[in-house]
Image (spheres, rainbow, N blue to C red):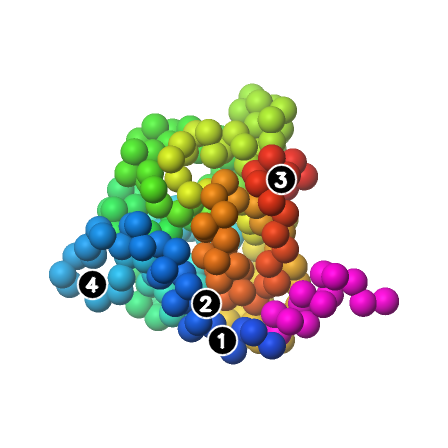
Amino acid sequence: MTTPYSRRAQSARVCRPLRWLSMLLLGVALVSTAVQAAPAAEKAPISSTIAVIGAGDMGQALGNLWAAAGYRVIFATRHPDTLGDVVERAGHGARAATVADAIEQAGIIVLAVPYAAEPEIAQAHGSAMKDKVLVNVDNAFEHRDGEIATKAEAVGEAVYSARLFEGTRFIRAFNLKSAHSFPAPDAIESADFEVPYTVNDDSVRPMAEALIHDTGGTPVYEGGLENAREY
């Protein structure tokens, strides 16, 4: 039997060759952040620049796919000088920077860190993230993250994180998928998997769907963040 989700997957395989149209929509959706000029030495617009905070398995899996899709990707950690191998594997002009520098230059920020690190990041960089797109892929685990996991699960991890990063255009996505299950960049056209997502601002939906398509996935819109209780 053909389900609504499988029909979405068939449609996505037809639409993926139009990736650059998605990129155009991405730029329109971020017009409010585009007024921030990128440094003179960098040609990529801020609206198509992604700061991936965290360079573990998930950060690398997503960053590598987006770099191959044409975004400018900046991997950001406390010690960017140790990310030479990460940048080399990503290729396509990817680079490393401090968290602060990456956030300043990017219109899209991706959190791919242990959930317990979120409050510290929010305290240090929350103001700089306001009005930008924030993609949250973190999962809270009590055995690893402690008390914050219990608090987050009580209200929903997406809702809890969005409260930490108040003022961001928040997307909850990708956290149901293992980092090692994403396709290679040259195999996304034949990929067939779904990515549920929720947002706190409907205007960011074109951005969310472009980012999902460019990893090989089929977006499945689930509504507002309160609907993300299971992910």
Secondary structure at badge 1 equals helix
Q: Which of marks 2 and 3 is nearer the N terminus?
A: 2
Residue ranking furthest to the left: 40
Q: Which of marks 3 and 4 is nearer the N terminus?
A: 4
Please provide percent x and percent y for residue 78. 32, 41
Q: Which dot marks residue 42?
A: 4
Amino acid at circle 4 = Glu
- The magenta stretch is 1-13
- 3 vs 4, front mark: 3
Q: Which of marks 2 and 4 is nearer the N terminus?
A: 2
Q: Is residue 80 visible?
A: no
Q: Which dot marks residue 18?
A: 1
**Pointer 3 with pointer 4, Cβ within 8 A:** no
Secondary structure at badge 2 equals helix
What residue sits right under mark 2 in the picture?
A: 22
Q: Earlier in the sequence, mark 1 or mark 3?
A: 1
Q: In this view, does 74 lie above or below 158?
A: below
Q: Is residue 162 above or below residue 32?
A: above
Considering depth in this image, is 33 or 142 the residue closer to the camera? 33
Considering depth in this image, is 43 or 29 the residue closer to the camera? 29
Amino acid at circle 3 = Ala
Cα separation, mark 3 vs mark 4, equals 36 Å
Q: Is residue 11 above or below residue 38?
A: below
Amino acid at circle 2 = Ser
Amino acid at circle 1 = Leu
Cα separation, mark 2 vs mark 4, equals 22 Å
- 2 vs 3, front mark: 2
